[in-house]
Image (tube, rainbow, N blue to C red):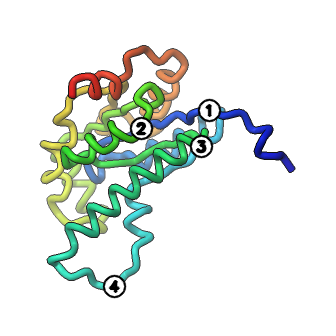
Amino acid sequence: MEHLSSVPPRSGLVIFLNGTSSSGKSSIATELLAMLDEPYFHMPVDAFHAMRSRGDVPPDRLATVLHRTWQGYHRAVAGMAAAGNNVVMDHVLSAEWRLTDCLALFEPQDVVLVGVHCPLPELERRERERADRPPGLAARQLEQVHAHGVYDVECDTSRSDPRECALRIRDFLTARPTPTAFQRLRAAR
């Protein structure tokens, strides 16, 4: 059994997949986990929503419950990375405060911000096929999710399959340029 005192401190890397619902983030994350050399944890925001009890939340409290869930999610990812764990984060920056919160919490040099793009007609087709998302969710998210406009890596899941996107991200990791997208975004604020 390894003693904690023998574990050297380090910061973990966060591969931050940002895109609308149904854009392909989870499929890319699955491919990444299969091909990365070091251990990574896939931490999708959907998993945090799924942890919540199934009781009905009164409509006047729903926004607060969701906001706290996202805040907790950001802090959980930041905590895993601060403990030296690598994380593939699967998120939707469909509200400005989410990006602001992440910029304040994460070590900007240790984040690879990935834009996961997909055109609206394809997003709508995927939503119809999935049937586990409200119709029009991706359309409502589309304008804000990429509004910050700065990424380290971008992919279009209507043109590349999840494995091709994951390979592009993996290849980017070998020589990450600085400043990172998170460093540029933080400096701009």
Left or right side of 101 for 48:
right
Three-letter code, disc 1:
Arg
* Residue 131 appears in the figure: no
Of the residues under marks 2 and 1, which one precedes in the sequence?
Answer: 1
User: How far apart, in angstroms, are the residues tagged by discs 4 and 1?
Assistant: 40 Å
Amino acid tagged 4: Gly
C-alpha distance separating marks 2 and 4: 32 Å
Mark 2 or mark 4, whichever is nearer to me: 2
Q: Which mark is residue 26?
A: none
Looking at the image, residue 154 lies above or below residue 62 = above
Decide which of 23, 12 is in the foreground and name it.
12
Which residue does the image show at 37% across and 81% down from the upper left?
A: 54
Q: Which quadrant of the figure has residue 131?
A: bottom left
Disc assigned to residue 106: 2
Residue 55 badge: 4
Residue 94 point in image, percent of width and height: 21, 48
The residue pinned by badge 3 equals 83
Real-space Cα distance between discs 1 and 3?
7 Å
Mark 2 surroundings within 10 Å by alpha-carbon count, few (fewer than 14), some (14 through 19), many (20 or more): many
| In the image: residue 167, left or right of residue 178 | right
SS at circle 2: loop
- Coordinates of residue 120 in the picture (x, y in percent): 16, 45
Q: Secondary structure at mark 4?
A: loop
Q: Which residue is denoted by mark 1 in the rendering?
A: 10
Q: Amino acid at mark 2?
A: Phe
